[in-house]
Image (spheres, grey):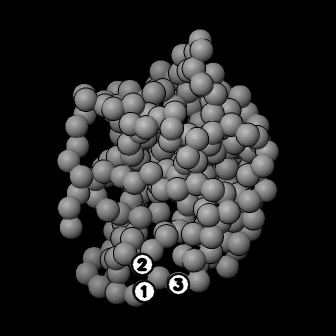
């Protein structure tokens, strides 16, 4: 099974939808998570026909921003536990007899002054269930200064708090293949900022079930975020050489 996660920067533009459809056709994910959809629920729901993924959960954005959606294939069972404007928490498994595990799709708090609320949310959902767990999405924070490229250093306290919540949650970063950043502010020269904000993190029990799981940073021309693709088993159809600095 593959899971595609993308902060798509809105799905109101036909070219963005075309790129999303192309990503699904090429990589064939059975689950697609979108954040920052920025559209009414009906517009987002209708995407299921273009994507060929008949099931969908939607959380409408506040005002003109935000908005989350998870689409999934009929070969996958997805049971909702809880959702908010920052996350969708589900139990997921492949039919008919796949192993059940917990997936939390994340859209992190973009305002740094309010990010502590996001970390508290993650801590609250930690003990909701006992299944192996994986979290994927845009966390709006990086773990280390080496994941941030700009003329200014990232706030050390913010990164430390992010690392602490992952430690409290007893999960680890599963790594990636592709470019080392997932966010590019698209500015030129000294104003350019690149950061690894999107990632997948998992528990040891999840990793033992999916020891070949790999995350890829894909390429997008329509968003300031890269789509990320989580493959639970080795994917020989789309080999990708890891980026080397």
Viewer-closest of 183 and 237: 237
> Dot 1 corresponds to which residue?
153
Instruction: Look at the image and tell me whether residue 54 can be seen.
Output: no
Q: Are marks 1 and 2 in contact (CB under 8 Å)?
A: yes
- The answer to whether 69 appears left or right of 238 in the picture is right
Q: Is residue 78 above or below residue 90?
A: above
The N terminus appears in which quarter of the rendering? top left
Instruction: Look at the image and tell me whether residue 143 can be seen.
Output: yes
Q: Are marks 1 and 3 in contact (CB under 8 Å)?
A: yes
- The answer to whether 100 appears left or right of 53 in the picture is right
Neighbour tally class for label 1: few under 14, some 14-19, many 20 plus, Cα within 10 Å: few
**Which element type, helix, strand or loop, lies under badge 1?**
loop
Residue 34 percent across, percent down from the top left: 54, 44
Q: Residue at x 64, y 28 (%)?
A: 100
Residue 158, quarter of picture: bottom right
The C terminus appears in which quarter of the rendering? bottom left
**Which element type, helix, strand or loop, lies under badge 2?**
helix
Q: Earlier in the sequence, mark 1 or mark 2?
A: 2
Q: Residue at x 63, y 39 (%)?
A: 132
Q: Which mark is residue 155?
A: 3
- The answer to whether 220 appears left or right of 47 in the picture is left
Residue 136 percent across, percent down from the top left: 54, 48
Q: Are marks 2 and 3 in contact (CB under 8 Å)?
A: no
* Outermost residue, top side: 96
Q: Is residue 107 above or below residue 26?
A: below
Q: Is residue 185 above or below residue 71?
A: below
Residue 210 percent across, percent down from the top left: 47, 35
**Which element type, helix, strand or loop, lies under badge 3?**
loop
> Dot 2 corresponds to which residue?
145
Viewer-closest of 190 and 233: 233
Q: Earlier in the sequence, mark 2 or mark 3?
A: 2
* Spatial separation of the CA atoms under disc 2 and disc 3: 9 Å
């Amino acid at each position: 099974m593959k899971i595609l996660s993308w902060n798509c920067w809105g799905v109101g533009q036909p070219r963005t939808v075309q790129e999303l459809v192309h990503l699904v056709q090429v990589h064939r994910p059975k689950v697609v998570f979108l954040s920052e959809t920025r559209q009414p629920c009906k517009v987002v729901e209708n995407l299921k026909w273009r994507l060929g993924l008949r099931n969908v959960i939607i959380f409408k954005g506040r005002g003109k921003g935000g908005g989350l959606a998870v689409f999934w294939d009929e070969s996958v069972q997805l049971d909702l536990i809880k959702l908010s404007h920052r996350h969708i928490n589900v139990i997921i498994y492949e039919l008919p007899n796949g192993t059940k595990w917990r997936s939390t799709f994340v859209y992190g708090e973009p305002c740094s002054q309010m990010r502590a609320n996001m970390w508290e949310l993650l801590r609250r959902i930690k003990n909701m269930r006992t299944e192996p767990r994986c979290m994927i999405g845009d966390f709006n924070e990086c773990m280390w200064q080496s994941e941030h490229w700009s003329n200014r250093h990232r706030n050390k306290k913010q990164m430390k708090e992010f690392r602490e919540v992952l430690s409290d949650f007893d999960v680890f970063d599963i790594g990636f293949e592709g470019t080392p950043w997932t966010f590019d502010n698209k500015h030129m020269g000294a104003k350019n900022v690149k950061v690894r904000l999107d990632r997948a993190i998992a528990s040891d029990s999840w990793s033992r079930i999916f020891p070949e799981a790999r995350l890829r940073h894909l390429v997008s021309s329509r968003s300031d975020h890269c789509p990320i693709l989580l493959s639970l088993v080795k994917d020989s159809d789309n080999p990708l050489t890891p980026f080397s600095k």
